[in-house]
Image (cartoon, rainbow, N blue to C red):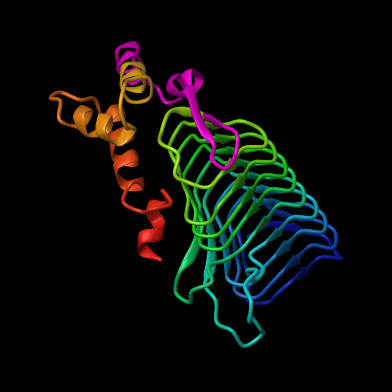
Amino acid sequence: MSHTIHPTAIVAPSAKVGSNVMIGPYTVVEEGTVIGDNTVLDTHVVIGKDTRLGKNNRVLAGAVIGRPPQILGLNEDTKIGGLTIGDNNMIREYVTIHPSMHPERDTIVGNGNLLMINVHLGHDCFLEDNIVISNCTQVSGHCRIETGAWLSGMVAIHQFVTIGKWCYAAGYTGINHDIPPFVIVSGHYPPEIRAINKRGLTRAGLTPEQQNKVFDAFKFIWRGNGPILERVKELAGQDGLDEPVKAMIESLTNSSKQRFGRYLELYR
Protein backbone atom coordinates (compact mmCIF):
# COMPACT_ATOMS: atom_id res chain seq x y z
CA MET A 1 0.00 0.00 0.00
CA SER A 2 1.80 3.13 -1.21
CA HIS A 3 1.48 6.53 0.39
CA THR A 4 3.68 9.58 0.98
CA ILE A 5 4.18 10.83 4.53
CA HIS A 6 6.43 13.82 5.20
CA PRO A 7 9.18 13.12 7.77
CA THR A 8 7.85 15.82 10.10
CA ALA A 9 4.30 14.44 10.13
CA ILE A 10 3.10 12.39 13.12
CA VAL A 11 0.85 9.45 12.26
CA ALA A 12 -0.37 7.19 15.07
CA PRO A 13 0.48 3.49 14.62
CA SER A 14 -3.21 2.58 14.87
CA ALA A 15 -4.22 4.92 12.02
CA LYS A 16 -5.26 3.22 8.79
CA VAL A 17 -3.87 5.07 5.77
CA GLY A 18 -5.11 4.12 2.30
CA SER A 19 -3.33 3.94 -1.03
CA ASN A 20 -1.88 7.03 -2.70
CA VAL A 21 -2.45 9.19 0.39
CA MET A 22 -0.24 12.26 0.85
CA ILE A 23 0.37 13.61 4.37
CA GLY A 24 2.19 16.95 4.49
CA PRO A 25 4.68 18.62 6.83
CA TYR A 26 3.81 18.87 10.55
CA THR A 27 0.44 17.21 10.09
CA VAL A 28 -0.87 15.07 12.97
CA VAL A 29 -3.07 12.00 12.48
CA GLU A 30 -4.27 10.64 15.82
CA GLU A 31 -5.21 7.17 17.03
CA GLY A 32 -7.92 5.09 15.37
CA THR A 33 -8.33 7.30 12.31
CA VAL A 34 -9.05 6.04 8.82
CA ILE A 35 -7.74 8.00 5.82
CA GLY A 36 -9.23 6.82 2.50
CA ASP A 37 -7.42 6.31 -0.79
CA ASN A 38 -6.15 9.30 -2.79
CA THR A 39 -6.72 11.73 0.08
CA VAL A 40 -4.35 14.68 0.57
CA LEU A 41 -3.67 16.19 3.98
CA ASP A 42 -1.78 19.46 3.53
CA THR A 43 0.65 21.04 5.98
CA HIS A 44 -0.22 21.57 9.68
CA VAL A 45 -3.49 19.62 9.48
CA VAL A 46 -4.79 17.86 12.61
CA ILE A 47 -7.04 14.80 12.28
CA GLY A 48 -8.49 13.82 15.66
CA LYS A 49 -8.79 10.29 16.91
CA ASP A 50 -11.42 7.92 15.51
CA THR A 51 -12.13 10.26 12.57
CA ARG A 52 -12.94 8.50 9.31
CA LEU A 53 -12.26 10.15 5.95
CA GLY A 54 -13.35 8.52 2.71
CA LYS A 55 -11.63 8.63 -0.67
CA ASN A 56 -10.38 11.56 -2.74
CA ASN A 57 -10.66 14.18 -0.02
CA ARG A 58 -8.36 17.20 0.18
CA VAL A 59 -7.78 18.94 3.51
CA LEU A 60 -5.78 22.15 3.29
CA ALA A 61 -3.36 23.90 5.65
CA GLY A 62 -4.31 24.45 9.26
CA ALA A 63 -7.61 22.57 9.24
CA VAL A 64 -8.49 20.83 12.52
CA ILE A 65 -10.82 17.91 11.93
CA GLY A 66 -12.26 15.68 14.65
CA ARG A 67 -10.87 17.29 17.78
CA PRO A 68 -13.20 17.41 20.83
CA PRO A 69 -16.35 19.55 20.69
CA GLN A 70 -16.74 22.87 22.50
CA ILE A 71 -18.95 21.85 25.41
CA LEU A 72 -18.69 22.80 29.08
CA GLY A 73 -17.39 20.17 31.46
CA LEU A 74 -15.47 18.22 28.85
CA ASN A 75 -12.22 16.66 30.06
CA GLU A 76 -9.78 13.97 28.96
CA ASP A 77 -11.94 11.24 30.50
CA THR A 78 -15.19 12.31 28.83
CA LYS A 79 -16.36 9.80 26.24
CA ILE A 80 -17.42 11.39 22.97
CA GLY A 81 -18.50 10.15 19.56
CA GLY A 82 -16.84 10.26 16.17
CA LEU A 83 -16.71 12.06 12.86
CA THR A 84 -17.37 10.44 9.49
CA ILE A 85 -16.54 12.27 6.25
CA GLY A 86 -17.44 10.81 2.85
CA ASP A 87 -15.68 11.09 -0.52
CA ASN A 88 -14.55 13.91 -2.81
CA ASN A 89 -14.76 16.73 -0.27
CA MET A 90 -12.65 19.89 -0.42
CA ILE A 91 -11.92 21.22 3.08
CA ARG A 92 -10.07 24.51 2.89
CA GLU A 93 -7.69 26.30 5.26
CA TYR A 94 -8.49 26.53 8.97
CA VAL A 95 -11.80 24.69 8.78
CA THR A 96 -12.86 23.10 12.09
CA ILE A 97 -15.23 20.14 12.33
CA HIS A 98 -16.13 18.59 15.68
CA PRO A 99 -17.16 15.00 16.41
CA SER A 100 -20.40 14.05 18.15
CA MET A 101 -20.73 14.85 21.83
CA HIS A 102 -22.52 11.51 22.29
CA PRO A 103 -20.65 8.18 22.48
CA GLU A 104 -21.64 5.80 19.67
CA ARG A 105 -22.84 8.69 17.46
CA ASP A 106 -21.12 10.60 14.68
CA THR A 107 -21.00 14.03 13.14
CA ILE A 108 -21.48 13.27 9.44
CA VAL A 109 -20.26 15.05 6.31
CA GLY A 110 -21.39 13.52 3.01
CA ASN A 111 -19.83 13.61 -0.44
CA GLY A 112 -18.69 16.30 -2.86
CA ASN A 113 -18.90 19.21 -0.43
CA LEU A 114 -16.83 22.41 -0.48
CA LEU A 115 -16.06 23.99 2.89
CA MET A 116 -14.21 27.26 2.39
CA ILE A 117 -11.72 29.04 4.64
CA ASN A 118 -12.56 29.29 8.37
CA VAL A 119 -15.83 27.38 8.19
CA HIS A 120 -16.87 25.80 11.50
CA LEU A 121 -19.15 22.76 11.84
CA GLY A 122 -20.26 22.03 15.39
CA HIS A 123 -20.78 18.64 16.97
CA ASP A 124 -23.57 16.34 15.79
CA CYS A 125 -24.17 18.14 12.50
CA PHE A 126 -25.28 16.18 9.45
CA LEU A 127 -24.27 17.49 6.03
CA GLU A 128 -25.60 15.75 2.94
CA ASP A 129 -23.96 16.08 -0.51
CA ASN A 130 -22.86 18.79 -2.97
CA ILE A 131 -23.06 21.58 -0.40
CA VAL A 132 -21.06 24.81 -0.62
CA ILE A 133 -20.28 26.70 2.60
CA SER A 134 -18.39 29.95 2.08
CA ASN A 135 -15.73 31.67 4.16
CA CYS A 136 -16.21 32.17 7.91
CA THR A 137 -19.69 30.64 8.05
CA GLN A 138 -20.41 29.17 11.48
CA VAL A 139 -22.73 26.18 11.90
CA SER A 140 -23.78 25.37 15.46
CA GLY A 141 -24.23 21.87 16.81
CA HIS A 142 -27.04 19.48 15.83
CA CYS A 143 -27.78 21.20 12.50
CA ARG A 144 -28.77 19.42 9.29
CA ILE A 145 -27.82 20.85 5.90
CA GLU A 146 -29.48 19.13 2.98
CA THR A 147 -28.15 18.36 -0.49
CA GLY A 148 -27.10 21.24 -2.71
CA ALA A 149 -27.54 24.04 -0.17
CA TRP A 150 -25.26 27.05 -0.73
CA LEU A 151 -24.31 29.24 2.23
CA SER A 152 -22.55 32.50 1.45
CA GLY A 153 -19.90 34.16 3.61
CA MET A 154 -20.26 34.82 7.34
CA VAL A 155 -23.60 33.09 7.70
CA ALA A 156 -24.39 32.15 11.32
CA ILE A 157 -26.69 29.21 12.05
CA HIS A 158 -28.37 28.49 15.38
CA GLN A 159 -28.18 24.97 16.81
CA PHE A 160 -30.81 22.41 15.72
CA VAL A 161 -31.64 24.29 12.51
CA THR A 162 -32.38 22.45 9.24
CA ILE A 163 -31.28 24.09 5.97
CA GLY A 164 -33.39 22.77 3.08
CA LYS A 165 -31.98 21.31 -0.12
CA TRP A 166 -30.89 23.55 -2.98
CA CYS A 167 -31.56 26.77 -1.06
CA TYR A 168 -29.26 29.79 -0.87
CA ALA A 169 -28.38 31.92 2.16
CA ALA A 170 -26.97 35.37 1.40
CA GLY A 171 -23.91 36.74 3.18
CA TYR A 172 -24.24 37.82 6.82
CA THR A 173 -27.55 35.96 7.21
CA GLY A 174 -28.32 34.94 10.80
CA ILE A 175 -30.49 31.82 10.68
CA ASN A 176 -32.39 30.87 13.84
CA HIS A 177 -35.17 28.71 12.36
CA ASP A 178 -35.55 26.05 9.66
CA ILE A 179 -35.24 27.12 6.03
CA PRO A 180 -37.36 25.22 3.46
CA PRO A 181 -35.91 23.84 0.22
CA PHE A 182 -35.30 25.86 -2.97
CA VAL A 183 -35.55 29.36 -1.48
CA ILE A 184 -33.28 32.38 -1.08
CA VAL A 185 -32.98 33.65 2.50
CA SER A 186 -31.29 36.75 3.86
CA GLY A 187 -31.32 39.03 6.90
CA HIS A 188 -31.20 38.00 10.52
CA TYR A 189 -33.32 37.56 13.62
CA PRO A 190 -35.53 36.74 11.93
CA PRO A 191 -34.14 35.96 8.46
CA GLU A 192 -36.63 36.38 5.64
CA ILE A 193 -37.51 34.19 2.68
CA ARG A 194 -36.97 36.45 -0.34
CA ALA A 195 -37.49 34.40 -3.50
CA ILE A 196 -36.97 31.02 -5.16
CA ASN A 197 -33.37 30.04 -5.87
CA LYS A 198 -33.62 29.61 -9.64
CA ARG A 199 -30.01 28.50 -9.91
CA GLY A 200 -30.64 25.89 -7.25
CA LEU A 201 -33.59 24.50 -9.18
CA THR A 202 -31.37 24.14 -12.24
CA ARG A 203 -28.56 22.51 -10.25
CA ALA A 204 -31.10 20.11 -8.77
CA GLY A 205 -32.03 18.95 -12.28
CA LEU A 206 -35.68 19.96 -12.09
CA THR A 207 -37.54 20.14 -15.39
CA PRO A 208 -39.04 23.48 -16.52
CA GLU A 209 -42.48 22.15 -15.55
CA GLN A 210 -41.28 21.22 -12.06
CA GLN A 211 -39.61 24.60 -11.68
CA ASN A 212 -42.83 26.39 -12.61
CA LYS A 213 -44.71 24.41 -9.99
CA VAL A 214 -42.17 25.41 -7.36
CA PHE A 215 -42.57 29.07 -8.34
CA ASP A 216 -46.36 28.71 -8.19
CA ALA A 217 -46.12 27.14 -4.73
CA PHE A 218 -43.87 29.96 -3.55
CA LYS A 219 -46.33 32.60 -4.73
CA PHE A 220 -49.22 30.75 -3.10
CA ILE A 221 -47.44 30.41 0.26
CA TRP A 222 -45.50 33.68 0.59
CA ARG A 223 -47.45 36.10 -1.57
CA GLY A 224 -50.99 35.11 -0.65
CA ASN A 225 -53.30 36.42 2.04
CA GLY A 226 -53.48 35.09 5.57
CA PRO A 227 -51.04 33.21 7.82
CA ILE A 228 -48.36 31.22 5.99
CA LEU A 229 -49.12 27.99 7.84
CA GLU A 230 -52.77 28.16 6.82
CA ARG A 231 -51.75 28.56 3.18
CA VAL A 232 -49.35 25.62 3.54
CA LYS A 233 -52.19 23.45 4.86
CA GLU A 234 -54.42 24.54 2.01
CA LEU A 235 -51.74 23.73 -0.56
CA ALA A 236 -51.08 20.35 1.08
CA GLY A 237 -54.73 19.44 0.50
CA GLN A 238 -54.43 19.78 -3.27
CA ASP A 239 -54.10 16.70 -5.49
CA GLY A 240 -51.19 15.91 -7.81
CA LEU A 241 -48.45 17.85 -6.03
CA ASP A 242 -44.90 17.41 -7.36
CA GLU A 243 -42.22 15.99 -5.04
CA PRO A 244 -40.31 19.32 -4.82
CA VAL A 245 -43.50 21.09 -3.72
CA LYS A 246 -44.19 18.32 -1.22
CA ALA A 247 -40.69 18.82 0.18
CA MET A 248 -41.41 22.51 0.77
CA ILE A 249 -44.71 21.70 2.46
CA GLU A 250 -43.11 19.04 4.66
CA SER A 251 -40.34 21.40 5.77
CA LEU A 252 -42.72 24.20 6.72
CA THR A 253 -45.11 21.81 8.47
CA ASN A 254 -42.35 20.17 10.49
CA SER A 255 -40.76 23.45 11.56
CA SER A 256 -44.14 24.69 12.80
CA LYS A 257 -44.24 21.86 15.35
CA GLN A 258 -41.57 23.55 17.48
CA ARG A 259 -42.25 27.00 18.85
CA PHE A 260 -38.95 28.42 17.60
CA GLY A 261 -39.29 26.81 14.18
CA ARG A 262 -36.49 24.25 14.63
CA TYR A 263 -37.87 20.80 13.89
CA LEU A 264 -34.76 18.93 15.06
CA GLU A 265 -35.14 20.45 18.52
CA LEU A 266 -38.18 18.23 19.06
CA TYR A 267 -35.69 15.38 19.49
CA ARG A 268 -33.37 17.24 21.84
Q: Specify whether residue 94 is painted magenta.
A: no
Residue nearer the viewer, 143 or 6:
143
Question: Which residue occupies the extreme bottom position in the image?
Answer: 77
Q: Quadrant of residue 189?
A: top right
The quarter of the rendered structure image containing the N terminus is bottom right
In front: 40, or 206?
Answer: 206
Residue at 74% from the left image edge and 48% from the top image edge: 118
Q: Give the range drawn in magenta.
A: 185-214
In the image, residue 201 lies at what x, y percent? 43, 22
In this image, 219 relative to 70: left or right? left
Picture mark count: 0
Along the horizontal axis of the image, is 122 left or right of 193?
right
Examine the structure image and report whether residue 203 is included in the region drawn in magenta: yes
Q: Nearer the viewer, residue 100 or 18?
A: 100
Q: In this view, does 45 lie above or below 118?
A: below
Compared across the picture, whether 9 is left or right of 169 comes to right
Q: Quadrant of the C terminus?
A: bottom left
Q: Position of residue 205 (x, y in %)?
A: 40, 22
- Residue at image position (12%, 25%) is 239
161 relative to 50, above or below: above
Quadrant of the rendered structure where residue 114 is? top right
Above or below: residue 18 compared with residue 74: above
